[in-house]
Image: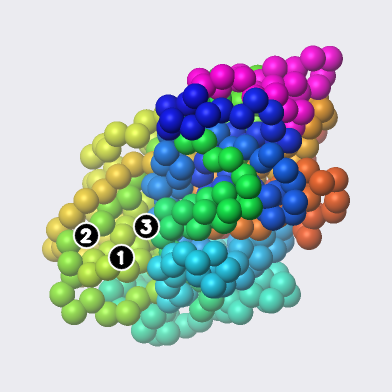
Amino acid sequence: MNESGRELPSRASVVIIGGGAMGVSSAYALAAAGVPDVVLVDKGPLGSGSTSKAAGGVRAQFSDRVNIELAVRSLETFDAFAERFGQEIDLHKPGYLFLLDTPAAVAEFEKNVAIQNDLGVPSRMISLREAAELSPLIDTDGLLGAAYSPTDGHCTPESVVLGYAGAARRLGARLLPNCAATGVETVDGRITAVLTEGGRIETDTVVCAAGAWSAPVGAWVGVDLPVTPLRRQVLVTEPVPDLPPTAFTIDFGTTFYFHREGPGLLLGMSDPDETPGFKLDRSDAWLPRLGEAMARRAPALMETGIATGWAGLYEVTPDHNALIGVAPEVDRFIYATGFSGHGFLMSPAVGEVVRDLYLGREPFVDVSGFDARRFALAGARPELNIV
């Protein structure tokens, strides 16, 4: 019996470790494909890790073709989510607007837009005048260009988790929150069981979807998953009077971003002085740098009060790209982690990829470049459009 009061199954076809968006999407995709006895375990409530702390952005404006393809597939799912899963996710599509202040950034985004367009994404370079119309709170002083895609937006991560979890359970999957995995048993290079706080589950297959907590899960079976937890903080303002419609706006040079959240704005920015670790407390150390970025790019926000905020964890890899694959070191260990801040938005598509890796068939996109061994083999493929 686990802490949620449910009896622990003694056997599973596959055990998924991690109950965020990636884990529940994978559980749904496996169960929908007819895989019996799918079990998911998580140390806390479903979605209570990084998913619940995400800013909720969903976009296809990336520099890597595979990331674009994963994002496009996921956006299609988000568009149809309420109809398919019976769960509203508060999807808004004001578009993503990237503000660029160096010639190098403009050149990079021009190249990225060409790749995105080739893959069906309606992104485009726009004038600063149009950028100011799409995001009326910004000051365009110092900007050299901007990129925009009207099909990007944001939604509520917790609602996505609820939709996938409900659908997975209706198809027979067992989702066990508050039941932490504590180890994986192997015999002669084969997985035999997952150990949990509630007991032992026999299985021959494990899916690691543990996000920032993935490195120790990989270590249980001798697989190096180079994922580093890094704190990122988010703030939500008090209501902004007469708040105009605004795109999800990102000042690419500083990574300062904001989007509408109810009557106010959700905003954040990376902190170059942040150090790795499982830090979930809020810190004020980044606020002066945030204030400088706001004063320069969105000075109208400087008089707006902060209503609330929180800290979450990015799951960072050395090249800011995901780790997706099947480990050769041990039989039937599948991993989908290390998305460096864009795991939530790619979770629908990656759940499909996990399903196909489990079934031994070719996924809709070639993810071989995301093999975790690429760093040892000098095959890193940096994703440049990370904020």
Q: Position of residue 82 (x, y in %)?
A: 50, 70
* Depth check, front residue: 116 or 32: 32
Name the kind of residue labelled 2 in the image: Thr
Residue 3, label in figure: none
Front tag of 1 and 2:
1
Front tag of 3 and 1:
1
Front tag of 2 and 3:
2
Residue at the disc numbered 3: 256
Residue at the disc numbered 2: 237
- Label 3 element class: strand
- Main SS, magenta residues: strand
Residue drawn at 35 percent across, 63 percent down: 258
Corner quadrant of residue 358? top right
Give the answer, above or below, for where 23 lies relative to 221.
below
Q: Is any atom of residue 328 visible in this view? A: yes
Residue span colored magenta: 183-207
Residue 261, label in figure: 1
- Mark 3 Cα within 10 Å, few/some/many (few <14, many 20+)? many
**Structural distance between the alpha carbons of marks 3 and 1:** 16 Å
Residue drawn at 40 percent across, 68 percent down: 90
Q: Position of residue 131 (x, y in %)?
A: 41, 79
Q: Is residue 206 magenta?
A: yes
Q: Is residue 204 left or right of residue 138?
A: right
- Mark 1 Cα within 10 Å, few/some/many (few <14, many 20+)? some
- Mark 2 Cα within 10 Å, few/some/many (few <14, many 20+)? many
Name the kind of residue labelled 1 in the image: Glu
Residue drawn at 17 percent across, 61 percent down: 238
Q: Position of residue 309 (x, y in %)?
A: 26, 48
- Label 2 element class: strand
